[in-house]
Amino acid sequence: MKQSTRINKIPVIFLAAVLFVMLMSGWALGMFTDIEEEPYVSEDADRIVVGVSQLGSESMWRTANTESVQNTFTQQNGYFLIFNNARQKQENQIKAIRSFISQRVDYIVFSPVVETGWETVLQEAKEAGIPVILMDRNVDVKDKSLYVTCVGSDFVKEGEKAGRWLENDLKRSGRQDSEINIVLLKGTEGSSSQIGRTKGFFEVAQTHDNWNILAQEYADFTSAKGREVMESILKKYSQIDVVVSQNDDMTFGALEAISESGRSVGVEGDITVISVDGTHEALSMVADGIINVDIECNPNQGEYVSDVIRMLESGEKVEKQYYVDEDVFTADNVTESVLSERNY
């Protein structure tokens, strides 16, 4: 029995016509980025139609997150997926969500580029009776009923883990009372991950008077920007003890800049490197002693979102927030088994 709050299924003929027009006009090229979904046919009438707006493809983590979604919301699993890549632009996401509403999808799932500016379009979804599920990142809205739940990482905890690891590492090396010069590379300004990780790290840092934050700059979660920002910082400061980077891609760019400056990094180097994500490439660098520690941010969230949808379909109550499981990786626990099982 379907929930009373569920909307009627999309008429087959209507959707087929819409899809045909979209494909012929070329608009669908932006909508179905990297998706190979079969056409909507009569057998799909009982499938759950999910519209997903991904914020972009700015990093390896984001690519893995997208793959998790596309591998979960398949016709074999009882879904019909409409996928959109917003290319890091909020206006593209708002346009996609309105498109989902007009197509009368059953659920809207999106990973917001930034936290603010969503009230109007989410109110439109609510009035249309379409449940909204946030994935990876959260939104800042006064009316929390505008979305059902958020599935993702505890970003504040990730930032705190980075701070606690540094705290313990300094104790192990006997430098807990020394002056420590720190550079913080932050992600996209206004995003949940940037806000949370910054907050979590500073909650630890503010308890240490000897931790000097030399610079904290936005680097947009990309390797190119990470390199550019790090190059600028290296020209300003001759003594840097720690680089805290809020994702692996920025870390890769920063490592290139540091190497070209003639300074060394890692377990045996001059600069301690703390990263966030836990991608295969970064964990290989952890194993090699190039990156000291990597705080995991688990991108495999598609199944978690699917579980929430199944709960809603059966009329079960869902929590307002679900966190995915995550770990902290150093050279001590990055084994061959860990690397071989990494799917991103």
Image: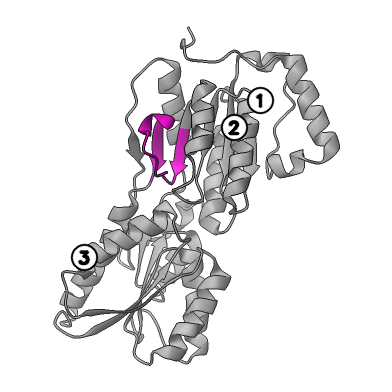
Task: Provide the residue span drawn in magenta.
Answer: 133-152
In three-dimensional space, the C-alpha distance between marks 2 and 3, rounded to whole angstroms, equals: 39 Å
SS at mark 2 in the image? strand
Q: Is residue 135 magenta?
A: yes
* Amino acid beneath label 1: Gln
Q: Which residue is mark 3?
A: 204
Spatial CA distance of label 1 from label 2 is: 9 Å
Estimate the x, y position of residue 15 in percent, counting from the top left. 73, 21
Q: Name the side, left or right, on which 52 lies relative to 152.
A: right
Question: Looking at the image, is 273 positioned above or below residue 310?
Answer: below
Check residue 99 for magenta coloring: no
Among numbered discs 2 and 3, the one appearing first in the sequence: 2
Task: Give the mark nearest the N terminus, 1 or 3.
Answer: 1
Amino acid of disc 2:
Gly
Q: Is residue 50 visible?
A: yes
Residue position marked by numbered label 2 in the rendering: 51
Give left or right: position of 86 versus 263: right
Is residue 32 at all visible to an observer of this figure?
no
Q: Which mark is residue 103?
A: 1
Task: For marks 1 and 3, give the CA distance.
Answer: 47 Å
Image x and y of residue 144, in percent:
36, 33
- Identified at 20% across, 77% down, the residue is 170
Which of the 4 image quadrants contains residue 268? bottom left
Contact between labelled residues 2 and 1, with CB atoms less than 8 Å apart: yes
Element type at marker 3?
Answer: helix
| Residue ranking furthest to the top | 1
- Please tell me whether mark 1 sits on a helix, a strand or a loop: loop
